[in-house]
Image (cartoon, grey):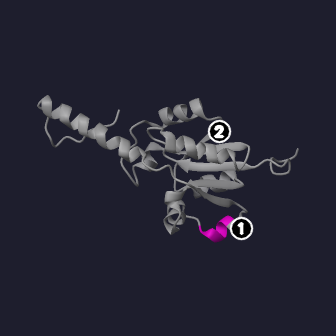
Amino acid sequence: MLSSKEMGASKVLTIGTFDLLHIGHIELFHWMKRFGNEMLVGVNADKFVQTFKNAPFQNYSQRCKNINRIFDCTIYKNNSSGKDLILKLNPDVLVVGMDWASDKYFDQINMSPEEFNQYNIALVFVPRTTGVSSSQLYSPMRSRLSRKDKEQGASTDVECRRL
């Protein structure tokens, strides 16, 4: 049986949290289509996300459902820095937003540029959609939740929890 590479197909991977799916995520998925025909999306597990930022607003299952509703891809759970998933899936191309175009991305995924060459994986940084991010969407939501708690006499020390 021929592999996807032998048939001329390209596996394209991106990895992220994809919380509060927005136009920037959708643009990233569209960029992926330019580099291949087998779309793979690594979605960060809830516990892993909490190791480097707040818990996602939507849980892992909901984030995966949202992605599958708008994008034809295969989703994989990412429980670590990304290196294990990258090596397991062996993509031809890894697509990442331009906001990660520095050494910090290599640090986060625990891989070096030399390893990308060794495994013959092209790392492509695509333009970031300006003016939108999940973090920006969180801010007004947190403010509204906090204001509602205050109006109801709740303690201001209570952290707003995501549903």
In-front residue for pair 12/101: 101
Q: Which mark is residue 118?
A: 1
In the image, what residue occupies the spot 73% across and 47% down? Answer: 36
- Could you tell me what secondary structure mostly forms the magenta stretch? helix
Residue 40 part of the magenta segment? no
Q: Which mark is residue 131?
A: none
Q: Quick check: 90 left or right of 5? A: left
Secondary structure state at the residue bearing disc 1: helix
Secondary structure state at the residue bearing disc 2: strand
Residue marked by disc 2: 74
Sequence-wise, which precedes: disc 1 or disc 2? 2
User: Which part of the image, by quadrant, shows the C terminus?
Assistant: top left
Magenta residue span: 112-116
Residue 74: image location, x then y, percent: 65, 39
Residue at the extreme left of the image, as rendered: 153
Residue type, mark 1 in image: Gln
In-front residue for pair 42/145: 145
Residue 153: image location, x then y, percent: 11, 31
Classify 10 Å Cα crowding around label 2: few (below 14), some (14-19), many (20 and above).
Answer: some
User: Which part of the image, by quadrant, shows the N terminus?
Assistant: top right
Q: Is residue 52 among what the camera can see?
A: yes
Q: Quick check: 145 left or right of 111? A: left
